[in-house]
Amino acid sequence: MATKKRTSVKSAPRKAAKKTPAKVTLPACGTYTVPRGHVSLCVPPYWTLRQSIDDIRLDSEDGETAVVLSSYQRNSDKVKLDAREYLKHFLQSAPVEGRVAAANNTARLASARFRDAEGGYWQVRFVSNTTTLVLATSHSNQPPASRDGRTATLVMESIKLKARA
């Protein structure tokens, strides 16, 4: 009986996998919906949520970052609430130091980021459905790239307003 001789086949050397920087994951959020049911937002774990008659306030664990939401209703049927106009008026009265970074603003959504004279980082976001306008402001003593800064951005972007209140 003839036996076959086994030969090992060498595979081509593999390239080392590219190392990508580790992604810092943000915490999973719970959703809070206001009692009227027309506004909802993401609430990160360990952040404090307080709702008063006038607004909703979220504070980070260390108290360095806060997000505040306020809601406004239209008084007459003729005037629609335009987020761009309100952002423009807000920035005129805000303590802006330096350049304002504004996003692609529309009548339903307008946002901007800036720093104030004391070195605080601000994010402003107006969300409108023409009858209701939600103003969300975020203030942090930490840079936007910090964990709390990214979490505040996540909260700001999670704000949902139903089409009609």
Image (cartoon, rainbow, N blue to C red):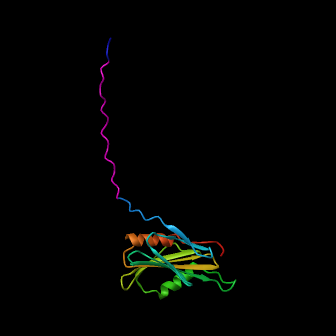
**Which quadrant holds the N terminus?**
top left
Most extreme residue toward the right is: 77
Asked if residue 135 lies in the magenta stretch, the reply is no
Residue 87 location (% of width, % of height): 52, 81
Q: Position of residue 114 (x, y in %)?
A: 42, 79
Q: Which residues are magenta?
A: 4-21
- In this view, 19 is above or below 35: above
User: Residue sitting at 43 percent across and 87 percent down?
Assistant: 95
Specify whether residue 155 is in view. yes
Name the residue at the bottom extreme: 93
Would residue 73 appear left or right of 99 to someone viewing this image? right
Quadrant in the picture for residue 163: bottom right
Q: Is residue 71 left or right of residue 154?
A: right
Whether residue 122 is visible:
no
| Residue 7 point in image, percent of width and height | 29, 25
Predominant secondary structure, magenta span = loop
**Is 37 placed above or below 12 here?**
below
Q: Position of residue 81 (x, y in %)?
A: 62, 81
In which quadrant of the rendered image does the C terminus lie?
bottom right
Of residues 134 and 77, the one nearer the viewer is 134
- 2 relative to 100 in the view: left or right: left
- Magenta stretch holds residue 9: yes
* 5 to the left or right of 27: left
Q: Residue at x 47, y 64 (%)?
A: 28
**Residue name at image x 51 percent, y 85 percent:** 90
